[in-house]
Image (tube, rainbow, N blue to C red):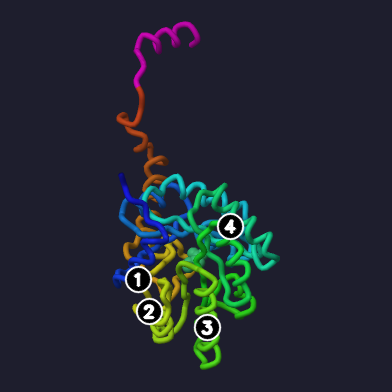
Amino acid sequence: MMEKITVNYFKEAKANGKKITMLTAYDYPTAKLLDEAGIDSILVGDSLGMVVLGYEDTTKVTMEDMIHHIKAAARGTKKAMLIGDMPFLSYHTGKYESVKNAGRLVSEGGCKAIKLEGGKEVTEDIKAIINAGIPVMGHLGYTPQSINVFGGHKAQGKTYETAVKMYEDALQLQEAGVFSLVLECVPHKLADYISKRLDIPVIGIGSGNGCDGQVLVTPDILGLFRDFSPRHSRVFVEMGNAYEQAVKRYIEDVKSCVFPALENTFKIDEDIIRQLEKELH
Ligand code: KIV
């Protein structure tokens, strides 16, 4: 039987110095492809808001949006650990709401853990969610749901005070019980410093090679999201242009009657057509 990746795998990978790989997926075919390619973990991130739903940031993503897309990704995920993002204001409004919403992502959506953004201020919510039996992944550094507080997409932890705060927040999240922590757009030496001092694995995005694993947004690595290309990402295979070419060829072939060809059609007995022509004209 195929062994599923769980929180234990994250722990062992850190202990054995094995890098953890994570990518985002928001639908069945992408999750299936990532899973079959051997990714360790799939995140249904609230980046959904930008790369799939066309919002300018993540603050409009709802619980219903997340559940809908987690459900689809769950159907395509057999081995990887599926993690669902808690959307804006589905926590921060009291422990009861946090546990209830985390529970919905797991029981209705089908993910095996949730991720939420923030430091010390969310540790009580994290403890309550874990007490309800749901593993939690933390997220520090540039936390996209706070874009309006940061005043834009900016690296975080660049001053002594903010670096200390981030390190202390990371320790508090670990203490609260998170099984892993995402560090987004954190100077690579600070991310390395924090990763080396935590027992839990740190998954970096825009935070350098010293982290215990990496996560990226899948449409970014395929060149499929063309509104902007984040500096921290890399296009591993350019599929956006190929996609556009395919659509242009389709338009051309339909307009010039090259498509559909005979092999794309279905046959009927000639006598039936003759009979139709004779009887119905
Ligand atoms: O929403 C998301 O996709 C994320 C990752 C990029 C870490 O939070």
Amino acid carrying mark 3 in the image: Met
Report how far apart the C-alphas of labels 4 and 2 lie in the structure: 34 Å
Give the structural element (helix, strand or loop) at label 1: helix
Q: Return the x and y of residue 228 as percentages of the image width and height.
A: 48, 70
Pick out the residue farthest to the front: 131
Q: Residue at x 35, y 28 (%)?
A: 265
Q: Nearer the viewer, residue 229 or 160?
A: 160
Give the structural element (helix, strand or loop) at label 4: loop
Amino acid carrying mark 1 in the image: Lys
Q: Which residue is mark 3?
A: 166
> Quick one: label 4 or label 1, which is nearer the N terminus?
1
Q: Residue at x 52, y 64 (%)?
A: 136
> Dominant secondary structure of the magenta stretch?
helix
Q: Return the x and y of residue 199 as percentages of the image width and height.
A: 41, 75
Find out whether residue 275 is within the magenta segment.
Answer: yes
Find out whether residue 73 is within the magenta segment.
Answer: no
Q: Which residue is mark 4?
A: 132
Q: Return the x and y of residue 2 as percentages of the image width and height.
A: 31, 47
Q: Are marks 4 and 2 in contact (CB under 8 Å)?
A: no
Which disc is residue 177 wearing?
A: none
Q: Nearer the viewer, residue 27 or 240?
A: 27
Q: Residues within 10 Å of mark 2 (few under 14, many from 20)?
A: many
Q: Nearer the viewer, residue 3 or 34?
A: 3
Q: Which residues are magenta?
A: 267-281
Q: Residues within 10 Å of mark 4 (few under 14, many from 20)?
A: few
